[in-house]
Image (cartoon, helix red, strand yellow):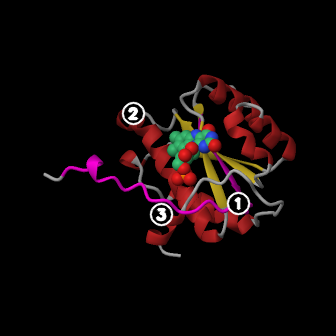
Amino acid sequence: MNVTEAIRSRRSIRKYKNEEIPQEDIHKMLEAAMMCPSARNMRPYTFAVVKSKEKKAEIAAISPNFRMMNSADIAIVVCGRLDIAAGLGHDFWQQDCSAATENILLQALELGYGTCWCGTYPVSERVEGIKKVLGTESENVVPFSVIAVGVADENPPAKGFYDETRVKFY
Ligand SMILES: Cc1cc2nc3c(=O)[nH]c(=O)nc-3n(C[C@H](O)[C@H](O)[C@H](O)COP(=O)(O)O)c2cc1C
């Protein structure tokens, strides 16, 4: 699968098969995340991989929008790290975390997995809920997104969003 195919066929998946993702594939997704472009190359993020059934259920309970976490094999939490994003790079940490999140979605797709990006920051009850699941109270750790990953048990068709009216050439 090339990048053109990956970008155009990716869909959010909210139903997963009960199949385990090998550690080497998880490693590949995290490696892809850490290869994203980063403001001043500060890479102000850390990643939490949640495999525990109980903890996935706790994440699913935080919001109805997170309920697919119950059937996903893993949840990857992309956390912004405010202590790393110091100085000039500070205001860019959300953009860095977005780039890392998207890299995970595309790498997962090529490896044969479905994903769903679940927005966490800046919704405070989601941020606090995820921090509780991860057992951190540090103000420097900000859960930015949670990505459900697993073998897809649904196959939504690719759809095109190209809209000429959103583009202006100068
Ligand atoms: C910042 C962000 C937050 C999102 N949060 C959620 C969420 O909490 N739950 C969910 O089911 N999908 C979530 N999504 C997925 C969107 O609903 C989805 O990308 C959109 O409907 C387009 O569908 P597609 O991904 O299949 O192209 C989120 C996507 C983004 C980019």
Q: CA distance from mark 2 to mark 1?
A: 38 Å
Q: Which residues are magenta?
A: 143-168
Q: Amino acid at mark 3?
A: Ile
Q: Earlier in the sequence, mark 2 or mark 1?
A: 2
Mark 1 highlights which residue? 154
Determine whether the residue tagged by mark 1 lies in a helix, strand or loop: loop
**Residue 127 forms part of the magenta stretch:** no
Q: Amino acid at mark 1?
A: Glu
x, y (%) of residue 66? 70, 39
Q: Amino acid at mark 2?
A: Asp
Q: Earlier in the sequence, mark 1 or mark 3?
A: 3
Q: CA distance from mark 1 to mark 3?
A: 18 Å
Say the numbered circle drawn on residue 47: none
Name the one closer to the observer, 166 or 111.
166
Determine whether the residue tagged by mark 3 lies in a helix, strand or loop: helix
Residue located farthest toward the right when viewing the structure as drawn: 54
Q: Earlier in the sequence, mark 2 or mark 3?
A: 3
Q: Is residue 43 in view from this perspective? A: no
Mark 3 highlights which residue? 7
x, y (%) of residue 129? 71, 28
Q: How many dots with numbers? A: 3
Q: Residues within 10 Å of mark 1 (few under 14, many from 20)?
A: few
Mark 2 highlights which residue? 91
